[in-house]
């Protein structure tokens, strides 16, 4: 099941698509486990009411974290209030320890014909020849590491060069209105996760510059929009993306760009032609092209003293990928990201100096970005997975042996499915697993303890080893994770597994589960200590929060968030800012939530993707996709409907492993499998069973499906970089199939 483990990293299921969230989990520098909240406060374990409901304004009660009910936390330790100071603290508390790590290809003299045990294991898992994939892929060595001081030196040299070249100007003195920050203060970061990306980000933090992450899957139109809106003059990017930028971007769009710093060497003997192509392409556009090594060398010759930012300085503009239209630039001040880290740490999370994080989720997103900030604060380190995550993630995990693993439901659901498929393969394994699982789950639910010496030693250790054997914290974000899968991860991997809820606009997490609370699941925890949460009425959809739960009905409504972790708005877009931010600071998420009796929040719907069928019934598309994602025969599902139609239909990517095994279709091409009537009947019956067991109403069930063997992917622009469905693009891509289904209903 390991090949699908990484292959499915780029699949999208409905649970991943349903909410446009980012969430993260962190631990405080203290190693002391806090007193269990259930013993402190009884029934309300996750939040407490700070202000009562206001029916006249359609507002529900305001709830805050139990550990900080009277104030919203802005910092964790006095004085450590910017990302620059976070990094400096990490260098100090780690005693200048390891900071970032990466893997490089071995030289011919280092490689062996056998490739060693790890290479042999990798060849079995990924079905390729040890030491390569048959296509000339080199064998990679162990992780190499840079210390905090070495990263700081590189960032200082990079920043010094940019300033000495007069292509950037630090924001000195009193920080301006973030909407008025000029392009000469912006630095674009355009690459996969790698150490040079961190150099660029930390250079911005040291010299009061603004980092603006770009990523290829935004699409050319979106990238051009960002270049025009920010007027950035410097872009730090990989060689591959620099060439694409020069080739595909209109010259008038690049008017403001004066310098491109290429992360890769431009003097490789094997790629001189390509190197020259990059340089000449830039020169033709009037853009200077330098490689990182040259820039750092020259920057060291004339260092510029750091010009650290204040808490009110703009730290980054994070453009949301979005599912429709051009992306919006979310402005994040230093105080926003610092407050998000502090608020999560105040929840009792114990991220330690000795922790190792595996970095593969995009640094261009706030989820991964905030994890790095929190890690730097405590002096932890992060190792980058290689660019081709589908191929290399598992191998890199086994080499790195991380203690912290942040992921998304899409991947974690597939881990669950593939393990269960393996378990169910033989009756003996299935019987032993069920007994061991049920025994440990029962104990966990009654005591809250996730470890069982006997079962962990003799049975569950074989699962734990697949993530390197050291993971103690598994964090899920970006979308809701089902309670069954969350419990499964806790039992099988014998680690703390929690999920949270948040958005780019809230820096990352706005609510988090409690690390010491292993008894419950099915929710996203309570507000972190730097955020307060309120639900507001959505009467047109039948959700009411202003009743305060007094009429016996649960408090439900649109989730609104306020606090120092919340962004001040969208960059140079006051109209869009006014659409979702109220004057008193409340940010409207567009998600529908419900307060549970224990004070935790449950996300139940998405406001924007609810519409009325022709007979007048409201349907929540993403909730329905969430249900069908639990179907064992479905890998991906796009549910479609129109207000002029009376029913729903769907485009479905079947789970080929399950289909092939059940119908004995080994060796049959996938394109042929999806055309078979028996396959469609199997998937339909399975979806009907799933819909019934999850309580879908008749009008919420799809009436017909079209099977496709091709996954919804980034390459065809059918999903966002955070793996959510792009509904408009999917509807257009499958227009003929959708029209045909409706024509025959």
Image (tube, rainbow, N blue to C red):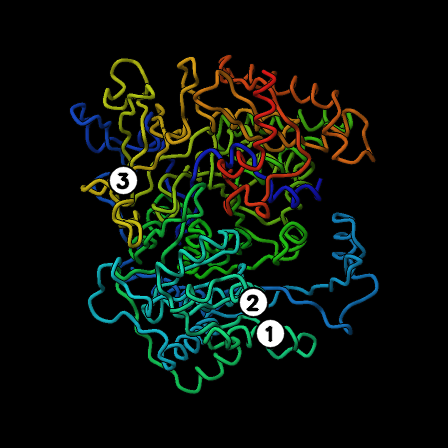
Depth-wise, is mark 3 or mark 2 nearer the camera?
A: 2
* Secondary structure beneath label 1: helix
Residue located at (21% from left, 33% from top):
50
* Secondary structure beneath label 2: helix
Task: Give coordinates of residue 442: x percent, y percent.
Answer: 55, 25
Residue 277's label in the rendered image is 1
Q: Where the N terminus falls, by quadrant?
A: top right
Q: Which residue is mark 2?
A: 243
Residue located at (51% from left, 27% from top):
640
Location of residue 305 by image quarter: bottom left
Q: Nearer the viewer, residue 651 or 359?
A: 651
Location of residue 663 by image quarter: top right
Residue located at (51% from left, 12% from top):
698
Residue 451 visible within the image: no
In this rendering, is residue 262 above or below 689? below
First in residue order: circle 2 vs circle 1: 2
- Do labels 2 and 1 touch, CB within 8 Å? yes
């Amino acid at each position: 099941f390991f090949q699908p483990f990484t292959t499915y990293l780029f699949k999208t299921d409905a649970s991943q698509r349903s909410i446009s969230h980012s969430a993260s989990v962190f631990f405080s520098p203290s190693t002391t486990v806090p007193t269990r909240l259930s013993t402190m406060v009884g029934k309300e374990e996750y939040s407490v009411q700070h202000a009562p409901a206001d029916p006249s304004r359609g507002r529900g009660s305001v709830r805050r974290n139990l550990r900080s009910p009277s104030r919203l936390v802005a910092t964790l330790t006095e004085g450590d209030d910017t990302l620059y100071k976070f990094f400096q603290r990490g260098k100090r508390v780690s005693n200048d320890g390891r900071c970032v790590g990466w893997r490089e290809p071995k030289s011919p003299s280092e490689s062996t014909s056998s490739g060693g045990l790890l290479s042999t294991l990798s060849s079995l898992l990924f079905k390729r020849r040890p030491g390569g994939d048959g296509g000339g892929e080199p064998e990679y060595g162990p992780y190499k590491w840079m210390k905090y001081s070495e990263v700081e030196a590189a960032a200082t040299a990079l920043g010094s060069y940019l300033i000495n070249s007069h292509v950037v100007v630090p924001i000195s003195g009193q920080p301006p209105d973030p909407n008025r920050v000029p392009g000469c203060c912006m630095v674009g970061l355009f690459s996969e996760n790698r150490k040079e990306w961190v150099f660029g980000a930390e250079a911005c933090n040291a010299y009061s510059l603004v980092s603006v992450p770009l990523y290829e899957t935004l699409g050319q139109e979106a990238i051009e929009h960002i270049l025009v809106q920010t007027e950035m003059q410097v872009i730090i990017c990989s060689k591959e993306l620099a060439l694409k930028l020069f080739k595909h971007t209109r010259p008038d769009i690049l008017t403001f760009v004066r310098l491109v710093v290429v992360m890769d060497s431009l003097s490789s003997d094997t790629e001189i032609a390509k190197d020259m192509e990059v340089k000449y392409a830039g020169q033709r556009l009037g853009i200077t092209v330098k490689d990182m090594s040259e820039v750092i060398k020259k920057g060291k010759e004339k260092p510029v003293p750091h010009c650290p930012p204040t808490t009110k300085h703009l730290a980054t503009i994070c453009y949301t990928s979005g599912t429709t239209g051009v992306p919006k630039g979310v402005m994040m001040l230093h105080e926003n990201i610092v407050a998000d880290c502090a608020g999560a740490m105040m929840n009792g999370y114990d991220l330690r100096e000795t922790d190792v994080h595996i970095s593969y989720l995009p640094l261009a997103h706030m989820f991964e970005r905030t994890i790095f900030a929190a890690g730097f604060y405590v002096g932890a380190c992060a190792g980058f997975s290689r660019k081709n995550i589908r191929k290399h993630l598992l191998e890199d995990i086994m080499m790195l042996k991380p203690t912290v693993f942040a992921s998304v439901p899409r991947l974690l659901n597939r881990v669950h499915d593939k393990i269960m498929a393996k378990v169910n393969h033989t009756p003996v394994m299935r019987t032993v697993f069920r007994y061991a699982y049920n025994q440990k789950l029962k104990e966990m639910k009654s005591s809250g303890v996730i470890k069982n010496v006997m079962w962990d030693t003799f049975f569950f250790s074989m699962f734990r080893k697949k993530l390197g054997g050291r993971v103690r914290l598994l964090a899920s974000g970006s979308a809701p994770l089902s309670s069954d899968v969350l419990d499964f991860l806790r039992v099988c991997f014998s680690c703390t597994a929690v999920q949270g809820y948040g958005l780019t606009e809230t820096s990352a997490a706005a609510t988090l589960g409690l690390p010491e609370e292993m008894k419950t699941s099915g929710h996203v925890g309570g507000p972190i200590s730097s955020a307060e949460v309120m639900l507001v009425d959505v009467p047109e959809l039948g959700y009411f929060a202003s009743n305060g739960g007094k009429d016996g009905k649960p408090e439900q409504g649109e989730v609104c968030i306020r606090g120092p972790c919340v962004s001040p708005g969208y960059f140079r877009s006051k109209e869009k800012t006014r659409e979702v931010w109220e004057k008193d600071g409340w940010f409207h998420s567009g998600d529908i939530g419900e307060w549970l009796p224990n004070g935790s929040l449950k996300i139940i719907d998405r406001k924007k993707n609810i519409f009325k069928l022709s007979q007048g019934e409201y349907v929540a598309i993403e909730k329905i996709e969430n249900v069908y994602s639990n179907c064992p025969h479905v890998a991906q599902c796009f549910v479609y409907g129109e207000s002029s139609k009376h029913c729903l239909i769907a485009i479905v990517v079947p789970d080929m492993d399950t289909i092939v095994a059940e119908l004995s279709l080994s060796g049959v091409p996938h394109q042929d499998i999806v055309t078979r009537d028996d396959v469609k009947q199997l998937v339909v019956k399975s979806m009907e069973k799933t819909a019934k067991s999850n309580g879908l109403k008749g009008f919420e069930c799809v009436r017909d499906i079209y099977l496709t063997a091709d996954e919804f992917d980034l390459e065809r622009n059918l999903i966002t970089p955070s793996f959510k469905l792009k509904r408009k693009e999917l509807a257009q891509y499958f227009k003929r199939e959708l029209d045909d289904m409706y024509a025959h209903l």
